Amino acid sequence: MSTDTRATADQLHTGLVDLLLTRGTVTSPQVEAALRAVPRHPFVPNTPLGTAYAPDDAVVTKRDAGGVALSSASAPGVVAAMLEQLDVRPGMRILEIGAGTGYNAALLASLTGPTGHVVTVDIDSDVVAGARNALAATGFTHVEVLTSDGAQGHAPGGPYDRIIVTAGAWDLPPAWWQQLTPTGRLVVPLRIIGGTSRAIAFDHAGDHLTSRSMITCGFLAMRGIGARDEPTLTLADGVSLLLSEGRTAAAEPMSDALTRASTRTWSGVTLRSGQPFQELDLWLATTSPGFCRIIAAPDAVTSDLATPAFRWGGAALTNSTDSFAYLTIRSAEPEDPDSADDRPVFELGVRAHGPHGDALTQVLLKQIQRWDDEHRDTTPRIDAYLKPAWPTAGTVIDKPNSVLTVTW
């Protein structure tokens, strides 16, 4: 690397950490110090420096023969937020599920220090080799990098004070429970229900785990024994419905509904730009029968074929036969034009397709209003129980190894 290129990398590195501090993503001196100590570009060597230090850009590092992403370096903003959730202290033993490029393991090693120990595992031997080489090249030779199915953890190195998962998990396998110390913390991007995911920090609470914090995120799904296919219904090029586990829907009538005239109904519920409303998706997922998610490619949004509220998709309902409806959004006028808050205002609404779209619209509108009246500022608590335990409070979500409850 030339002197000028190194200077540019250093400048971009510093700017990234400064931005994450300004945003409030980084809140602790420990995480700030780790992020400043470990540059990102050596772990993504074939990536332009501007992309390597972009706060919200994940970098795909391996694809299968069909072009599907298999491994990636998570966006720095997500990495930093999950490190804050994890709350690593010097001397801790840490297990990372999903080695990726090795960047996160280097940060973990920086946080736990010379008296701690980091084990990172990945199911893909190529990924493991790449992470091991990058860690060695950056001076983190003491990190243990192993090829293993992440759902099995790594018992010989446990028990662990902290376990962090950097792949989308559909369940909490027994090994993670068994290898976590009684005072330990598990941070995992968990697919809760209907494609709705959160990175959740779980602590022990007697006979179960309970959430301490949650952030919205998206991760490549786990492979191996922890993998789970989520049914997807393609409606058109660039538009699909991600159905809840175990559900099916009639492909031809649903696709036909998309091509016909839709209705848009507005809720009167508004929010300003920057106001969080991601928990609305989770509220709808846990209160609305027939919940699913609509995924729309940029071209589909631009052409008005599908206009979900989030750029990556959004909450939807389907009757599984011929109709669906989903959360959408539009610009709105502020209630108080003289307000000192000049951020843009948006109104939530429902777009519906199919002969029974009106009924689905009314269900969604009712739940949007309830969320606005009762839960706009609420973060739910998620508790996890290892089977055969079976809780009864809250919304109960059954997984193969565990049972989740969501309490608002």
Image (tube, rainbow, N blue to C red):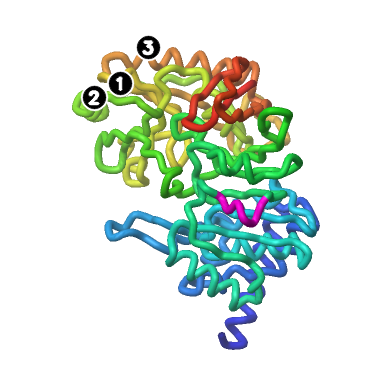
> Which marked residue is nearer to the observer: mark 1 or mark 3?
1
- Which quadrant of the rendered structure holds the N terminus? bottom right
Residue 189: x percent and y percent? 55, 43
Q: Quadrant of residue 176?
A: top right
Which mark is drawn over residue 320? Answer: 1
- Disc 2 marks which amino acid? Ala
Q: Secondary structure at mark 3?
A: helix
Say whether disc 1 or disc 2 marks the residue closer to the N-terminus: 2
> Which residue is more in the foreground, 216 or 334?
216
Relative to 215, does residue 9 appear above or below in the rendering?
Answer: below
Q: Which residues are magenta?
A: 153-158
Q: Is residue 342 visible?
A: no
Is residue 82 visible in the rendered structure shown here?
yes
How far, Cα to Cα, is label 1 from label 3? Answer: 13 Å
Q: CA distance from mark 2 to mark 3?
A: 18 Å
**Residue at position x 51%, y 51% from top?**
150
Q: Position of residue 222 (x, y in %)?
A: 45, 47
Q: Is 233 displayed left or right of 51 in the figure? A: left
- Where is residue 339? Give x, y as percent: 71, 31
Q: Residues within 10 Å of mark 1 (few under 14, many from 20)?
A: some
Q: Residues within 10 Å of mark 3 (few under 14, many from 20)?
A: some
Question: For the residue marked with disc 1, what is the amino acid?
Answer: Ser
Vertical comparison of 343 with 22: above or below:
above
| Percent x, y of residue 213 | 68, 37
Q: Relative to 204, is 273 on the left or the right?
A: left
Circle 3 sits on which residue? 359
Is residue 134 part of the magenta span, yes or no?
Answer: no
- Toward the viewer: 221 or 196? 221
- Name the residue located 42 percent from the left edge and 34 percent from the top edge: 308
Disc 2 marks which residue? 250
Q: Residue at x 23, y 24 (%)?
A: 250
